[in-house]
């Protein structure tokens, strides 16, 4: 019989999120209106992804990515490596 893997911790305790949510709603019932799907989430995610794609398109020919500062660094000649 193999020993159990130790890649994460198993717990027999009940899931804490539901109990914490119920306690929070009992203490502050006015926040119930904030729980649930937000219709603007799709628009925000779509806009951010579109912005990332546009930036990637604009910097596609930049060597070494985007330079975040004005410091000039010497150009290093790339050397090919030969597999051994």
Image (tube, rainbow, N blue to C red):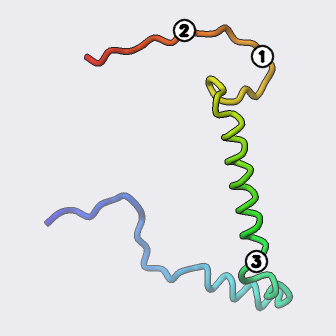
Q: Which mark is residue 38?
A: 3
The image shows residue 69 at horizontal and vertical percentages of 78, 24
Image coordinates of residue 51 in percent, x first then y, are 74, 50
Q: Quadrant of residue 48?
A: bottom right
* Tag of residue 52: none
Q: Quadrant of the N terminus?
A: bottom left
In this rendering, the answer to whether 78 lies above or below 4 is: above
Q: Measure how far apart labels 2 and 3 are at the Cα level.
A: 51 Å
Residue at 53% x, 81% y: name it: 15
Which residue in the structure is indicated by mark 2? 77
* Residue 57 in the image, given as x and y percentages of width and height: 67, 40
What residue do we see at 67% from left, 41% from top? 56
Residue under label 1: 71
Q: Residue at x 43, y 74 (%)?
A: 11
Instruction: Mark 2 or mark 3: name the one nearer the start of the chain.
Output: 3
**Residue at 75%, 13% in the rendered image:** 72
The C terminus - image quarter: top left
Depth order, front residue of 60/17: 60
- Residue 46, given in percent of the width and then of the height, sits at 71, 62
Exactly how many numbered labels are in the figure? Answer: 3
The one of 61 and 33 positioned closer to us in this rendering = 61
Horizontal relation, residue 73 to residue 32: left or right: left
Question: Element type at marker 1?
Answer: loop
Label 3: which secondary element: loop
CA gap, disc 1 to disc 3? 43 Å
The label nearer to you, 2 versus 3, is 2
- Tell me the crowding category of disc 3: few under 14, some 14 to 19, or many 20 or more residues within 10 angstroms, Cα based: few
Which of the marked residues, 1 or 3, is nearer the chain's N terminus? Answer: 3
- Is tag 2's residue or tag 1's residue first in the polypeptide sequence? 1
**Is residue 4 toward the left or the right of residue 33 in the image?**
left
């Amino acid at each position: 019989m193999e020993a159990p893997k130790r890649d994460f911790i198993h717990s027999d305790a009940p899931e804490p999120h539901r109990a914490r949510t119920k306690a929070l709603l009992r203490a502050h019932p006015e926040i119930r209106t904030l729980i649930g799907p937000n219709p603007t989430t799709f628009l925000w995610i779509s806009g951010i992804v579109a912005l990332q794609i546009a930036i990637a398109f604009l910097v596609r020919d930049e060597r070494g990515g985007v330079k975040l500062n004005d410091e000039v660094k010497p150009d290093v000649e790339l050397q090919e490596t030969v597999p051994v």
